[in-house]
């Protein structure tokens, strides 16, 4: 079954390039194009794509606010993949806070673009974990007040341990190896963490871990109770 993709970018040539790249992928279907954030929100609401490729810097409504509106609207299955020019774009952290499921550099290869869309569309949202973590480390402490530690109290000791390892960028398989448990067990823990904390995906788990101080910028270590 094809993943339905909406492209949001204010540059016509960029949109055309992405459409061409995705058009040769048998499992990806471009269902629409938006030239600004307002149009992206309207089309996402109308078309309900699986993934929105969202540029950050667009005239009028920017990609951050558009992401926030799309995620908060009645489109729970639509995920946003942020497109950025620089891997330390100061706006990326804001976009992740707004509910984006990951990000990708605009100069990524066609293969990387297609793979990223598939990963986000399938819910495996944490793209390029080390870069995502570096972005959060760069901006989390300075840009947002910490969430209260009490938010962690609803998690079991093992769930907090899994949360910390997710924030360090480990995959489910790597977490399973480190904790000497099965990968299915890790997936169950991750699902429970998302449910208990009301989070959308693994990217939001990483943001949450930094904002609560469970993991601190520059020191990916657990804050034991």
Image (cartoon, grey):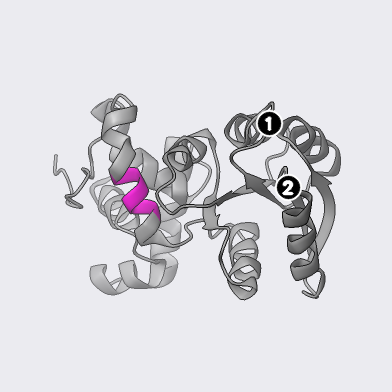
Give the alpha-carbon distance from disc 2 to disc 1, as whole Å.
11 Å
- At x 73%, y 52%, the residue is 50
Asked if residue 165 lies left or right of residue 102, the reply is left
Q: Earlier in the sequence, mark 2 or mark 1?
A: 2
| Contact flag, marks 2 and 1 (Cβ < 8 Å) | no
Asked if residue 35 lies left or right of residue 204, the reply is right
- Which residue is under mark 1? 59
**Which quarter of the image is occupied by the N terminus?**
bottom right
- At x 14%, y 39%, the residue is 225
Q: Does residue 32 appear anywhere in the picture?
A: yes
Q: Does residue 153 appear anywhere in the picture?
A: no
Question: Is residue 39 on the magenta stretch?
Answer: no
Q: Main secondary structure of the magenta part?
A: helix
Q: Residues within 10 Å of mark 2 (few under 14, many from 20)?
A: few
The magenta segment is 132-137
- At x 33%, y 71%, the residue is 174
Q: Secondary structure at mark 1?
A: loop
From this view, report whether residue 71 is shown above or below residue 115: above
- At x 54%, y 38%, the residue is 99
Residue 11's disc number:
2
Residue 72 coordinates in the image, percent (x, y): 64, 30
From this view, report whether residue 62 is shown above or below residue 134: above
Question: Is residue 136 on the magenta stretch?
Answer: yes
Residue 175's disc number:
none
Quick one: 36 or 144, which is closer to the camera?
A: 36
Quick one: 103 or 118, which is closer to the camera?
A: 103
From this view, report whether residue 8 is shown above or below residue 129: above
Residue 103 coordinates in the image, percent (x, y): 52, 53
């Amino acid at each position: 079954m094809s993943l339905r993709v909406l492209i949001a970018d204010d540059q016509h040539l960029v949109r055309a390039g992405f459409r061409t790249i995705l058009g040769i992928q048998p499992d990806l279907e471009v269902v629409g194009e938006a030239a600004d954030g307002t149009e992206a929100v309207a089309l996402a609401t109308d078309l309900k794509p699986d993934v929105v490729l969202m540029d950050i810097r667009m005239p009028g409504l920017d990609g951050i606010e558009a992401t926030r509106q799309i995620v908060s609207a009645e489109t729970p299955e639509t995920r946003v993949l942020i497109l950025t020019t620089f891997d330390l774009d100061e706006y990326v952290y804001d976009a992740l806070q707004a509910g984006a499921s990951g990000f990708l550099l605009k100069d990524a290869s066609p293969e990387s673009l297609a793979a990223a869309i598939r990963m986000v569309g399938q819910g495996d949202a944490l793209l390029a974990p080390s870069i995502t973590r570096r972005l959060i480390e760069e901006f989390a402490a300075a840009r947002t007040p910490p969430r209260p530690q009490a938010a962690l109290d609803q998690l079991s000791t093992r769930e907090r341990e899994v949360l910390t390892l997710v924030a360090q960028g480990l995959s489910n398989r790597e977490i399973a190896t480190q904790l000497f448990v099965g990968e299915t067990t890790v997936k169950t823990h991750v699902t429970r963490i998302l449910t208990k904390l009301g989070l959308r995906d693994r990217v939001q788990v990483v943001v949450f871990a930094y904002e609560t101080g469970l993991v601190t910028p520059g020191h990916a270590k657990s804050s034991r109770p």
